[in-house]
Amino acid sequence: MNAAERYAEVRAATEALAAPLSAEDQTVQSMPDASPTKWHRAHSTWFFETFLLAPFAPGYDVFDSTFGYLFNSYYDAVGPRHPRPARGLLTRPSADTIRSYRHHVDREMADFFFCGLPDDLLPLVELGLHHEQQHQELLLMDAKHLLASNPLQPAYQAMNPPTAPAPPRRSWRSFERQVVCIGHDAATFAFDNEQPRHEHLLADYEIRDTLVTNAEWIEFIDDGGYERPELWMSDGWSVVCTGNWTAPLYWTCVDDRWTQFTLHGPRAVSDHEPVCHISWYEADAFARWAGCRLPTEAEWETAAPPPADHSAAALEPNNAENWYGQVWQWTASPYTPYPGFRAASGAVGEYNAKFMVNQHVLRGSACITPPGHARRTYRNFYPPHARWPYTGLRLSR
Amino acid sequence: MNAAERYAEVRAATEALAAPLSAEDQTVQSMPDASPTKWHRAHSTWFFETFLLAPFAPGYDVFDSTFGYLFNSYYDAVGPRHPRPARGLLTRPSADTIRSYRHHVDREMADFFFCGLPDDLLPLVELGLHHEQQHQELLLMDAKHLLASNPLQPAYQAMNPPTAPAPPRRSWRSFERQVVCIGHDAATFAFDNEQPRHEHLLADYEIRDTLVTNAEWIEFIDDGGYERPELWMSDGWSVVCTGNWTAPLYWTCVDDRWTQFTLHGPRAVSDHEPVCHISWYEADAFARWAGCRLPTEAEWETAAPPPADHSAAALEPNNAENWYGQVWQWTASPYTPYPGFRAASGAVGEYNAKFMVNQHVLRGSACITPPGHARRTYRNFYPPHARWPYTGLRLSR
Amino acid sequence: MNAAERYAEVRAATEALAAPLSAEDQTVQSMPDASPTKWHRAHSTWFFETFLLAPFAPGYDVFDSTFGYLFNSYYDAVGPRHPRPARGLLTRPSADTIRSYRHHVDREMADFFFCGLPDDLLPLVELGLHHEQQHQELLLMDAKHLLASNPLQPAYQAMNPPTAPAPPRRSWRSFERQVVCIGHDAATFAFDNEQPRHEHLLADYEIRDTLVTNAEWIEFIDDGGYERPELWMSDGWSVVCTGNWTAPLYWTCVDDRWTQFTLHGPRAVSDHEPVCHISWYEADAFARWAGCRLPTEAEWETAAPPPADHSAAALEPNNAENWYGQVWQWTASPYTPYPGFRAASGAVGEYNAKFMVNQHVLRGSACITPPGHARRTYRNFYPPHARWPYTGLRLSR
Amino acid sequence: MNAAERYAEVRAATEALAAPLSAEDQTVQSMPDASPTKWHRAHSTWFFETFLLAPFAPGYDVFDSTFGYLFNSYYDAVGPRHPRPARGLLTRPSADTIRSYRHHVDREMADFFFCGLPDDLLPLVELGLHHEQQHQELLLMDAKHLLASNPLQPAYQAMNPPTAPAPPRRSWRSFERQVVCIGHDAATFAFDNEQPRHEHLLADYEIRDTLVTNAEWIEFIDDGGYERPELWMSDGWSVVCTGNWTAPLYWTCVDDRWTQFTLHGPRAVSDHEPVCHISWYEADAFARWAGCRLPTEAEWETAAPPPADHSAAALEPNNAENWYGQVWQWTASPYTPYPGFRAASGAVGEYNAKFMVNQHVLRGSACITPPGHARRTYRNFYPPHARWPYTGLRLSR
């Protein structure tokens, strides 16, 4: 698949994900951390317009000169921008206008590919497509949060519950003290934060083959997991108390039975599916309760298989035996630069580097991660209280 | 015009006001005090369904049993309700569904009128229609606030600026000490808070024939009105400082010229139009600066002519000589019950009575007040910091 | 008693009230609305220094030039000031230094009296003494709040509980429609807000002879008074819910028995004492529950006897039959200027006028009000949520 | 020096530090993160009472049974406690009572030492003394914050400014790739978080011999350091904007000259002294601006000399050439458990482990760190926005 084909495929995938959502659904922002669907569609388009078409495509006319202000996310180098918590006030431009915007940019990109987009811009195209894939995942996370906040509990997509999986194995894999190489160095694409590849000294450790399941999590709840401060980081315990946390996000207990809101609407919590929508604080407390700990990201990367090609995506996790395509897995590692890290130059250098504090690294990928987007070296990151991403855990000791 | 005709007319007016707004515009809530257009359309419909059709229309089927929860505004007696600040999260039901809801209720009401709605329910119909008219005004106020928050500054309705009015007269009318009768006692409709009619002793006073204009307000600004604490109530001065108030809401100063956002989009501030979108704090400070004071509501009611029938509505104020149909006029009177006041019984008794604290009375009516909705005895009320209603002032001394 | 004697007496009373409080007690600020004892002692002294000695006493040397900034309360005309919520950070100047400050100013005032303080300054002296008496009451209210916030629940002054009073009478007095004169016009001292004396038209009304008691309040609680929104103003209900109010301030229920914190330490709530430490919201809800209402301030002033001379002060209310010297009584009247009101000129004009919004008038006086400070025309005022003053109620209908 | 002598010495040092502070100074809490001096004196005493005397000293009588609630800091295992932000409300017990409390516990500890405190309790004594030394440093940090918040800017201790130091050398030391051992394993005391000693692989690096100075920091300011978002972490830039940061804490610029508040009162910022009172965000931004980075804690520990014995303490930093005894040095390392870390068992296990998130490690020690308290392996930690500790930096690359 050449760059133009890949471009067309990724861009179409975004529109397919937005299709089940009405213009109204696409406009509202359910919390400051989430963005409207419409905004994701526009912002990922703005990326191509701003970093490729405007500077490099001969004679390119900007679609609308106000969009630079409206759809810049956080690139200070590009100029001022609409404040993040106010993204949900933008009832105009309409979802229809955003569709036109996407068509315009896609047509111009197609022309640019056809007329000879210079090879040295291909990495920027690639970055734009990976960026768009990240926003595909965000689009679903954010839509889920919005729909969950509606008392009607509407489904993004109706679907019968899958067959309940069998209990996973729960075996441990052991590793001996060794110097490993961590990070990306292949010729293929990776974000700047996965580089440079570097040596790291690991002590002996064991890591579990399977993800922690809902059944295990219910055991934790039933054992007073959310009521025992000694299991928690001090900051985590504060959040538990002020947020009245008693279970993962989207879980509710009615008549002693746990239900969770999913993109298919409300469903019973299924025992042997991977637990999802937990914060780092909860993952860390669970691990302590289980007499284990979270793996470091180097331990995870050393133990993990490479991702299978193009696994079919689903909207909710269901297989605790997979390393990828289920839930992002919290690690013990704060998100910091690798030794020798250099941020990419120019505005795209703001992509990852300026978030390297107050976050923890997650590894693997989620069911809603676009096919082909996972890498063994991928470093996802969120602050320790975040629960609206598709987050779970794997134990280490 | 009989009740059924009047019902049809008022209900149609709401839909006409919503028509220029897209489904997206109708869904978003720009601040906790404002509600989405869609919500106003649904809530005013819910009023008829809940207080008339459900209890009294034989065999009435509720359109959707979830709407009672979603579209109750503040009637505690009716049951729990969706929290006010979360009204903007309701992307579902869609604006289209709300249209169907309105059609359903309107059809059922038409049947009910046709089949003999009992006479003793007519006052409740009348109340529902006045209630709906209030929401027509709120719909425009709230839409203006939403559109103003958009960096694109879109117009609700495009229109060329009107001819600038001539300067108004600024004469004073004098009244001598007297016992007056205040409040409503005719057979016609009035809200419970306008009753009972009662005696009130007035001392001598003068009141100005015309509204305070933008030119006068600019004089106040230029004389340091927003910078001199001695002109302000202590609470008002706090709001000025924390809110960085330097002019009425929606005013911006670019290159020494004042512009205001209107429902027709941004426009130059026109000298002889009535000032609009000021808080009680600002009205009070202006009056002090001018060596005058605000009239009490009894003074206003005594001096005011009755409203002309069915004045044609506009979207922005433009005539400082009118007592009605321009801007609501802040009075010196806190909103309290009249002597002998009794709230209406049942849930509709929550309509007015429970807001009789921390608010000031406004008299007259605004350009966006529906035709036929004004009364000389009408008591509108807002907290002293509110600026998004169409609020202005008239001086007294 | 001449002015110099009266000066000495009032000033000494302040020091007597502060005496039971340690330097530590006198320094801490338990909430932004309260001030440290030390600050009250200094601020009331600053009043005499700033408005009398500095401008008028020949050759007066300011005690410390920094005190103008530290101890100005809210007089914008006098210059900038230390922010109110930061008063509790002033560990320096020490309580000892404040004592020296008071001695210095008292000595200079004594000299000024002796050497012939001009007669036209006597009203300012009088104002300063009434001002100081107000701060005597605030000192006790604020100290009570501080001590109550201490888990040790220390008494300001140890004392055995008094004999429990007999149940009060609960009779009603009736008044017919009449034009009354309200406000102060004698040659004696009154604040500007009690003036001018003016006519007011009253309809028929009845007012209760006695204050509402703890026993009645417990009935209200037991009847679900704090759980029924229909009894409350909308804003009041919000405060009940967010503040988890279930009883007056300082009340706690242990093993089904109500205890209250008092300046004598914790004590059982005594049935026939006047209820104290309730907000306007609570007073209003109670009156509605009782099928009555709060009196207006004009009704109160018309019905009230004049205060007895120099009633002996106590620290807690204990007699429900008194109009004065027990608890301030909430009225239905928002605090607004009387017709024809003019604020005093100069900085002292900021004394009352700039607070005439968002407050309700209280009448009578409290057990901690200094002897001789009560007047039938006295207008005390607090915002409707305030509970730390000594506030109670009397019913009307 | 035996344990009893060391106990007496450390305990006396606390009292000496508190001596210049009045009872009022010792009572007030200037922000939620700071504690009153009196509280520090009581809490460190409570540690000995709770963990040594009460469980182990035969026949020990608790001094006051309420103190367990009042002076527990964060030990959930010990029971409920007074909320941290309310420590400043405790005007009682008085500073005098706390002195008695300390005498009581010291006398009982002396008896316990004399009568044969079991050897296996000596580590707990040692922990209590190190704990007390940490509170000695906190006492000074917190007192500085309180005094700085006073408009009078009082000195903790008057003292003439020292001779301005000469400019430091600014040379770099180089290290080659190697596996180092990090952490404490000697028989001497260390906190649990410094253990276990473990291997760590270091790449090549250089580290500067000297601390960053005020002169360098002024260069950073003058080059727009606080105005250029590209130098900052995203979270840091938020704090700069919302907190209006333009210089280190306690710095003010008057007439183009920088002044800083010190424990000796206000002083001119001296060029060649180490910069102090900066957050991690500022340290990180400075390093980026300088084309360098912060060292990791392993790099720091590898490069640092051991601390000299019993260096004399000062109240403000003045020598940029020292590794210890000036300012704590921010590292690039988030505070996480060492591989194989186990928290101490029992309540003292809450000492360090539950804070291992959202903090960064600082190395070295400060001028106000008690003599003998520094270690090469010492891991101090604060959240990245903290500025009131004595914090500075050293560059790496």
Image (cartoon, coloured by chain):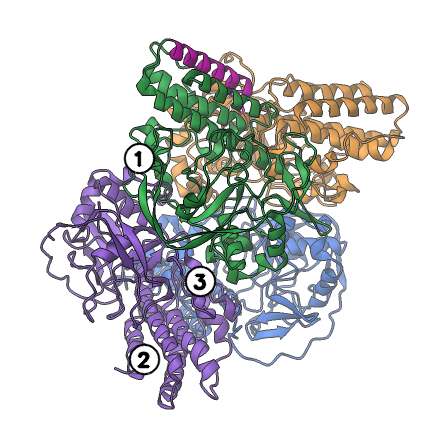
Chain colours: A blue, B purple, C green, D orange
Between tags 2 and 1, which lies in front?
1
Is A395 rendered above or below residue B256?
below
Task: Name the amino acid type tagged 1.
Answer: Ala
Q: Which residue is mark 3?
A: A29
A7 and B214: which is toward the camera: B214
Secondary element type, mark 3: loop
Q: Pointer 3 and pointer 2: residues touching (CB < 8 Å)?
A: no
What chain does badge 1 belong to? C
Q: As drawn, is D209 to the left or to the right of D233?
A: right
- Tell me the distance, in whole angstroms, between the alpha carbons under discs 3 and 1: 49 Å
Residue assigned mark 2: B7
Around disc 3, counting alpha carbons within 10 Å, would you say few (fewer than 14), some (14 to 19), or many (20 or more)?
many
Do the numbered discs 2 and 1 sit on residues whose CB atoms are within 8 Å? no
For marks 3 and 1, give the one nearer the viewer: 1
| Image: magenta residue range | C91-114
Marks 3, 2 in one chain: no
Image coords of residue A301 (percent x, y): 64, 56
